Image (cartoon, rainbow, N blue to C red):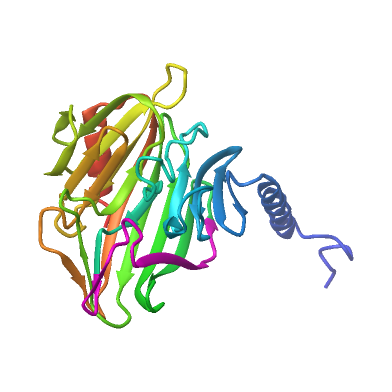
Amino acid sequence: MSNRFHRGAIPRCNLAVVCAAIIWMMSVTLAEAVPAPFRLTLEPDFVTLFEGEHPVFRYVRGEILAPGAPEDRRRSTYIHPLYSVDGLPLTDDFPADHLHHRGVSWMWYKVVCDGVTTDLWTLKGVRQRFERMLTPALYEDRAVLRFRNGWYQDADGKRILEEQVTLTACQAEGRGRIIDVELLFSAPGSPVTLGVSNTGYSGFGVRFGPCDSKTILTSSGPITADENRNPHRWADFTARFTDTLRLDGITVFDHPSNPNSPPGWTLRFYGYLNPAFTSRTDDYTIRPGELLRLRYRLWVHRGRPSAERLEQLYQDFARQK
């Protein structure tokens, strides 16, 4: 029987497969040659996320202290700066009026363990410490950063709480960018109780930098004066952070799966948004073997948004399990 092909010839069906494979390998090579939109810079005290050339946020993992600030103000494990879509810093750290305020943070005024009451809010007797960063995931449309931290008592160095932080920053679209924050807390030994101040301060908060033309819009409507403990699904702070006419802002959304949602809020026109899940209820105790999960969404945006747009964003967030 004669051979249908000369020696070394490639059958037609196999030739098509080979061509397809070559095209696929070229496409993979080209895709790998295109830089990802997200990238990280790592420093001893900071992890900074960029989208292209614009910074998105900087996570503070070192225990830092501003020049001239008292030693007891030293702190770690929070976000500052959080940047606008165009790379403008929107948050403040070590502000002169409240040295303990720190960018985007999660800190409780009342922390009780083994009968000892300490204050993470103003860093009296307990503080958060960075322990390790898990491998980041940088995708085309989002970046996911995860950190493991601990809460330590100053008096004896005891580690009383485990803290896991997941930050998911989405690619900027149109007028804004979504950043999701998930906080997981567990007590490795004794129960830990969390509570608020007399005016409701505690928990997740955003401290804004110097600005003017300020407005605060909530899910219940706009407000014209500072508020304590009133319940809202979300709250937005928009202002002018530069000498131009440009407006930028951040909306904080509380996920309905959080305990006692909607929470009471502490809202300040000097620049503070603070949903506290124990603001309108009793203190909350984390017992060994239990897990406290808190979820918040930040929408960093250009311009002054409408209530309808913000409510739509809230409903999108609320549908996520």
- Residue 141 appears left or right of 206: right
Q: Nearer the viewer, residue 135 or 122?
A: 122
The extreme left residue here reads: 281
The quarter of the image holding the C terminus is bottom left
Q: Is residue 267 above or below residue 123?
A: above
Q: Is residue 160 above or below residue 30?
A: below
Q: Residue 187, how many percent across, how many down? A: 30, 76
- Residue 40 appears left or right of 27: left
Q: Residue 172, how many percent across, how many down? A: 46, 37
Q: What residue is at 40 percent from the left and 65 percent from the top? A: 128
Q: Residue 286, how many percent across, how many down? A: 23, 72
Quadrant position of residue 230: top left
Q: Is residue 78 above or below residue 230?
A: below
The extreme right residue here reads: 7
Q: Is residue 121 in the magenta section? A: yes
| Residue 231 at least partly seen | no
Q: Nearer the viewer, residue 220 or 169?
A: 220
The extreme top residue here reads: 245
Count of numbered badges drawn on the protein: 0
Quadrant position of residue 170: top left
Q: What residue is at 27 percent from the left and 64 percent from the top? A: 293
Q: Residue 121, how many percent across, how many down? A: 31, 56
Task: Write down the region rendered in magenta.
Answer: 112-137
Q: Is residue 136 in the magenta section? A: yes
- Residue 1 appears left or right of 101: right
Q: Nearer the viewer, residue 213 or 238?
A: 213
| Residue 81 at least partly seen | yes
The quarter of the image holding the N terminus is bottom right
Q: Nearer the viewer, residue 315 or 74?
A: 74
Q: What residue is at 44 percent from the left and 50 percent from the top? A: 79
Q: Is residue 131 above or below residue 142?
A: below
